Image: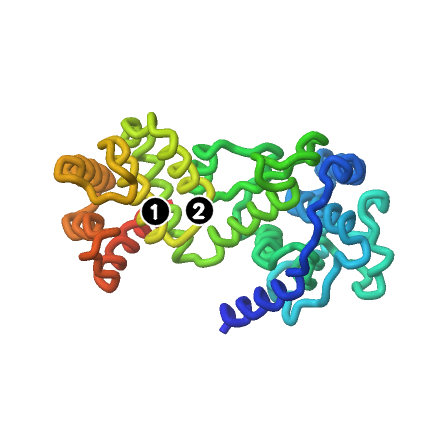
Amino acid sequence: EARINQHKQNVVHKKKTCKTQEPPDLCKEAPRVYERLQPLLHLWQHRQLTDTEMVGCFILVYIQHRMPQRWLGGKLEAPLLPQSAFDDTHCCCIYELPQAALDFSAVQKRLPPRPTIYFLFNSFYLHSVHLPAQRSIVRWFEGNWKLILMTRVPSPTEVLIQQSQGLRVVSMMIRLDELGSLILGEKDALNFLLHDLIHADRFFSDPICFQGQIGFYRLVLKAMENGLFDDLKADCKFIRDFEYCISDMNSFCGHLIKYLKAVIAVAFLRANNQQEHEMFNPEGELLFESYMSRLSTFWGMDESEQAAMRRLNRPEWNKATDLPLIRAFFERHGNQL
């Protein structure tokens, strides 16, 4: 029932935030956003704001700047967390924040006497902020989701190491040049941070899926550290696909290993001078199967698990019997955290 209600809230939220907007002119916007962030960053750097509060403030600065009259949406049908789940009385009241950075005067009548960042993210729709990102903020306050705030973009290997430890990064870009450009050529600073928060929701929200992901990342890291992917490093496309898998693809462990095996397969096709859409020739298939057998053995898979791995991505794959074996294997390694 809780998942159904969560899905309904997500659907309603998408309907409320799907109006087409012109993309902001980042070069013009950046100096204004940067100026508004400075007093908040000062408080954060002097430990007067927690990491979670700073991320919430960062988001609010952006949405207040971009949608000054409409940044605060309607109240959620139900809070993302019950009121009893977290005591926010020790958190900073939003009215105590520098007004030059954040102005709440226009919405004060809609809020209780002492609202906090936690209260806003837990109780209201926020313009351009999808509920999974809000849920990550709220759970971060609660303390059960272990997020790490960084002011840079970590390398894919850093993200892999963090995820293997049950941690997830949130990158908050704060330099003027970063606010005025697309991070990694893809997203502005706000959407890059929101993207990280959405990935955190995918990482933590389902406890069983969470354990499977940890197990997958731990085993991939172990294989990396022991050189099992070294022979593929000369293939630039493999590196791109592999780095996506280990750092930007939070998903069910069955999907992760399915993707990784496919990425390895096409790398072997390229190495064998075959097209990616082709079937392996006998020599190529022998090399690929030998490699996958070595990887499975290194990971400590038993005979039935190795057999399921061989069938993965092949016509003989039996989801009803093979998937539980693969899933249990990775979840078992995740439980060792």
Residue type (three-letter) at the residue carrying disc 1: Tyr
Determine whether, in the image, residue 86 is placed left or right of residue 68: left
Residue shown at 53% from the left, 67% from the top: 7
The residue labelled by disc 2 is 249
Quarter of the image that includes the C terminus? top left
Q: In this view, does 181 lie above or below 112?
A: above
Q: Position of residue 268 (x, y in %)?
A: 25, 35
Q: Position of residue 257 (x, y in %)?
A: 32, 47
Q: Nearer the viewer, residue 118 or 18?
A: 18
Residue type (three-letter) at the residue carrying disc 2: Met
Q: Nearer the viewer, residue 262 or 303?
A: 262
Q: Where is residue 68 in the image (x, y as percent from the top left)?
A: 80, 53
Classify 10 Å Cα crowding around label 1: few (below 14), some (14-19), many (20 and above): some
Residue 69 falls in image quadrant: bottom right
Residue shown at 38% from the left, 54% from the top: 252
Q: Are the residues at dot 2 and dot 1 in contact (C-beta closer than 8 Å)? A: yes
Residue 181 falls in image quadrant: top right
Q: What element carries label 1?
A: helix
Q: Position of residue 67 (x, y in %)?
A: 77, 53
Lower position in the chain sequence, tag 2 or tag 1: 2
Residue 244 falls in image quadrant: top left
Q: Which of 68 and 42 is in front in this view?
A: 68
* Numbered mark located on residue 259 in the image: 1
- Count all numbered tags in the image, as a single digit: 2
Determine whether, in the image, residue 181 is placed left or right of residue 327: right
Residue 56 visible to an observer of this rendering: yes
Determine whether, in the image, residue 147 is placed left or right of residue 228: right
Classify 10 Å Cα crowding around label 2: few (below 14), some (14-19), many (20 and above): some
Q: Nearer the viewer, residue 112 or 133?
A: 133
